């Protein structure tokens, strides 16, 4: 298993509502399971990343990232050097070129055909399960 996990949904839209420092603090609070954590500016957060997360196996999802700066400010310039082996970082974006500089490999999600899209829509729209 993982020692910590965090899913930051729709990073681009979240940054219209809060600063990168606030989003980074949210990430660290989730990963460290510490809602009272106060980090301060980005550089302070990167020190926390390095000091407190170095020996943890993490699962991080950054959804709808639109530029390289968002990635480096959220998970650190050093990237892989900050994280223990086994850590998984998933970044979703519409700009494949953005990932070329920062990841080892990419997976292109295939488009759904019409029937699959309708089936997914119906399962979410008409589900009686509140979690769907």
Image (tube, rainbow, N blue to C red):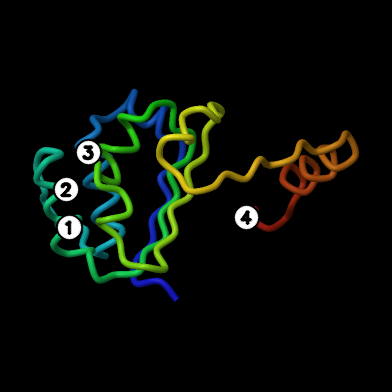
Residue denoted by label 1 = 50
Residue denoted by label 2 = 46
**How far apart are the two marked residues, 4 and 1, measured between alpha carbons?**
38 Å
**How far apart are the two marked residues, 4 and 3, measured between alpha carbons?**
29 Å
Residue denoted by label 3 = 22
Tag 2 or tag 4, which sits nearer the N-term? 2
Residue 1 placement: quadrant: bottom left
Percent x, y of residue 28: 24, 54
Mark 4 Cα-neighbour bin, 10 Å: few <14, some 14–19, many ≥20: few
Percent x, y of residue 61: 45, 50
Tag 3 or tag 1, which sits nearer the N-term? 3
- Is 112 placed above or below 97 here? below
78 or 58, which lies in front?
78
Q: Are marks 1 and 2 in contact (CB under 8 Å)?
A: yes
Tag 3 or tag 4, which sits nearer the N-term? 3
Residue denoted by label 4 = 130
Kind of element beneath mark 2: helix
Percent x, y of residue 98: 46, 29
**How far apart are the two marked residues, 4 and 2, measured between alpha carbons?**
37 Å
Mark 2 Cα-neighbour bin, 10 Å: few <14, some 14–19, many ≥20: many
Kind of element beneath mark 3: helix
Percent x, y of residue 64: 49, 34
């Amino acid at each position: 298993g993982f020692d910590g996990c965090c899913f930051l949904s729709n990073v681009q839209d979240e940054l219209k509502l809060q600063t990168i420092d606030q989003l980074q603090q949210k990430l660290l609070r989730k990963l460290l399971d510490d809602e009272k954590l106060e980090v301060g500016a980005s550089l302070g957060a990167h020190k926390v990343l390095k000091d407190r997360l170095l020996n943890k196996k993490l699962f991080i999802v950054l959804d709808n990232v639109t530029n390289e700066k968002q990635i480096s400010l959220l998970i650190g310039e050093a990237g892989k050097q900050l994280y223990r082996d086994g850590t998984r970082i998933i970044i979703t974006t519409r700009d494949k070129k953005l990932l070329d500089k920062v990841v080892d490999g990419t997976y292109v999600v295939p488009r759904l055909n019409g029937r699959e899209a309708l089936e997914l829509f119906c399962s979410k729209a008409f589900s009686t399960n509140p979690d769907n």
